[in-house]
Amino acid sequence: MINEKMYALGSTRSKIRELFEYGKELSKKIGAENVFDYTLGNPSVPCPEKVTKTIISEVQNPSIHGYTSAQGDLGARKAICDYNFNRYGFSLSPDLTYLTCGAAAGLAITLRALISSPSDKVLTFAPFFPEYKVFTENAGGSLIYAKCDESTFDIDFNAFELAINPDVQAVIINSPNNPSGTVYSEDSIVKLSKILSAKQTEYGHAIYLICDEPYREILFDGAVCPFIPKYYDNTVVCYSYSKALSIPGERIGYVSVSKKAENAQKLYLAIAGAGRSLGYVCAPSLFQKVIEKCVDSVSDSTVYKDNRDLLVSNLTRLGFTCVNPKGAFYVFMKSPVPSANEFCDVCKTYGLLVVPSDSFGIDGYVRLATCVSTDLIKRSIPTLEKIAKLYNL
């Protein structure tokens, strides 16, 4: 018999991917120059020159394509931990670090390691990356969430305290946030840590804070992204180099359990066991070596700020509402009508593709990726003007 749950996931794309595929087909019909696709968070800036040179150099090594240790090459794990210590003053351990095929694999195996009962819950903050629900349910638990403060998209701590309960085993935090671009401040992280520490005592069990951080290096206007293990002991970092190095298709990242976490070694071995059970062992060996040698490299994200400024200034000029993002490469805009899906369908008739917010856990917004070309944004402005007039903004 075919697994119906897996069939449902395979036969129905995420809304983001569905719109992206729709855009490719629409381009064939009306011409790519008439389609303004803001759907996919696909980095548009080139990877650092050092990364390119390292790839060319390493690929000539005849042994580069061989297996590494299941948890990743020790040299790469040491380089990652040294970099985090040098940058944040916090020591991660190579022996608690596991190389993965991007943050998605890291999240999937971490959740599989932490969820042991159908009653187990994972809590996150809306708006959130839709695949959190898929990863959590596949691990056998359920995802719950607390709504944000919509004036800032920061954590609404009253909503958080109402949502958390004794069945919560883990909390996922994503900063800079996809889709809102919000960067949670140090004050918010301190407050969150205090609440979680108190709840652990009240409930009598650990609550792990999973930090999903693929956008950690993409920051604007002097924003600072606190390194969360410094504030809360029971932390697991899930990181991806997809955005920082503009290499999303290469699928390389890591999971690292804080040395200060309760049962840190046992949790790490459970993560390794989850990786084994799902076949997520030995991340791409070429890119493990690339990370080892380029761990301090970052792509130039200046264009993302320029694109943000161009798009936000024009959206607000036309009467649309959005909070200026401090990081990542998305703009989260208020829909001019209550139904974001209805608004997106109207936009599609103009060749403008934006992602409705329903799957992000919040109603009435759309996400626009600013990692597109600046030229696309400029060319889309007349279309945005037409849509604004349609809604009398």
Image (tube, rainbow, N blue to C red):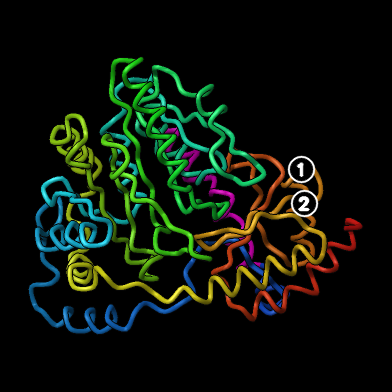
- Magenta-drawn stretch contains 385: no
Q: x%, y% of residue 27?
A: 66, 73
Q: Could you tell whether 245 is left or right of 130 in the image? A: left
Q: Could you tell whether 370 is left or right of 290 in the image? A: right
Q: CA distance from mark 2 to mark 1?
A: 6 Å
Task: Establish if 10 lies above or below 309.
Answer: above
Which quadrant would the C terminus be assigned to in this image?
A: bottom right
Q: Quadrant of residue 173?
A: top left
The answer, for residue 391, to whether it is visible in the render is yes
Residue extending farthest to the front is: 187
Q: x%, y% of residue 324?
A: 63, 59
Q: x%, y% of residue 267?
A: 19, 34
Q: Residues within 10 Å of mark 1 (few under 14, many from 20)?
A: some
Which dot marks residue 343? 2
Q: What are the residue bounds of the magenta stretch?
A: 1-25
Q: Quadrant of residue 196?
A: top left
Q: Tell me the amino acid under the disc marked 2.
A: Phe
Which residue is more in the foreground, 81 or 347?
A: 81
Task: Say which residue appears at 48% left-offset and 64% top-offset.
Answer: 222
Q: Tell me the amino acid under the disc marked 1.
A: Ser
Element under label 1? loop
Residue underneath mark 1 = 339
Element under label 2? helix
Task: Say which residue appears at 13% left-offset and 52% top-offset.
Answer: 94
Q: x%, y% of residue 65?
A: 14, 69
- Residues tagged 2 and 1 counted as in contact (Cβ below 8 A): yes
Task: Say which residue appears at 89% left-offset and 63% top-offset.
Answer: 389
Which quadrant would the N terminus be assigned to in this image?
A: top left
Q: Could you tell whether 134 is left or right of 114 in the image? A: right
- Magenta-drawn stretch contains 22: yes
Which residue is more in the foreground, 226 or 265?
A: 226
